[in-house]
Amino acid sequence: MIKKKILVVDDSRGWLDYHRSVLREIYGAEFAVYTANSARNGYDMIYNSLREPYDLIISDLQMELDFEPKHAGEWFIEQVQRLKEYKNTPVLIISATYNIKSIADRLEVSCLPKSIAARDLTSYKLVLEELLKI
């Protein structure tokens, strides 16, 4: 069985570990989870995987400050959306940003506030299942 590949992009080691742990708890070894600690690093990983794209991308919004007035996560998602290989790849923003919903709507991606992701594994799992169609 081919594992689905998930890329998680967040500048917080704690959140990267949390996502990896939750995905392992919910799905066992069904997914291969890759992590990037910045928007730039995430983009490099995306670009280097064009032949075998990730099946899902989870990204924070507030990371490095190089992309102001946008959040780094916004820049990252916009770059991903420009690549034809990622045209149909679902993206999930998990962030504590107060305007997460409006940013997700503008980018036409899904979102889940970090406060919900941290305390409600059922909601986390439901969003993933909807995006991955499992």
Image (tube, grey):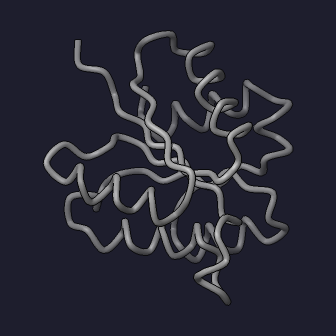
Q: Position of residue 89 (x, y in %)?
A: 35, 51
Q: Where's the N terminus, which quadrant?
A: top left
Query: Which residue is depicted at the point 52% across and 63% down?
Result: 39
Query: Which residue is depicted at the point 43% across and 11% down?
Result: 29
Frontmost residue, 113 versus 62: 62
Frontmost residue, 55 versus 45: 45
Q: Position of residue 40 (x, y in %)?
A: 46, 66
- The quarter of the picture where residue 68 lies is bottom right
Lateral position of residue 50 relative to residue 65, left or right = left
Q: Position of residue 99 (x, y in %)?
A: 79, 71
Frontmost residue, 101 versus 98: 98
In the image, residue 66 above or below residue 44: below
- The quarter of the picture where residue 72 lies is bottom right
Query: Which residue is depicted at the point 50% across and 48% down?
Result: 36
Residue at the left extreme? 51
Q: Where's the C terminus, which quadrant?
A: top left
| Number of numbered markers | 0
In the image, residue 37 above or below residue 3: below
Query: Which residue is depicted at the point 50% across and 10% down?
Result: 28
In the image, residue 7 above or below residue 122: below
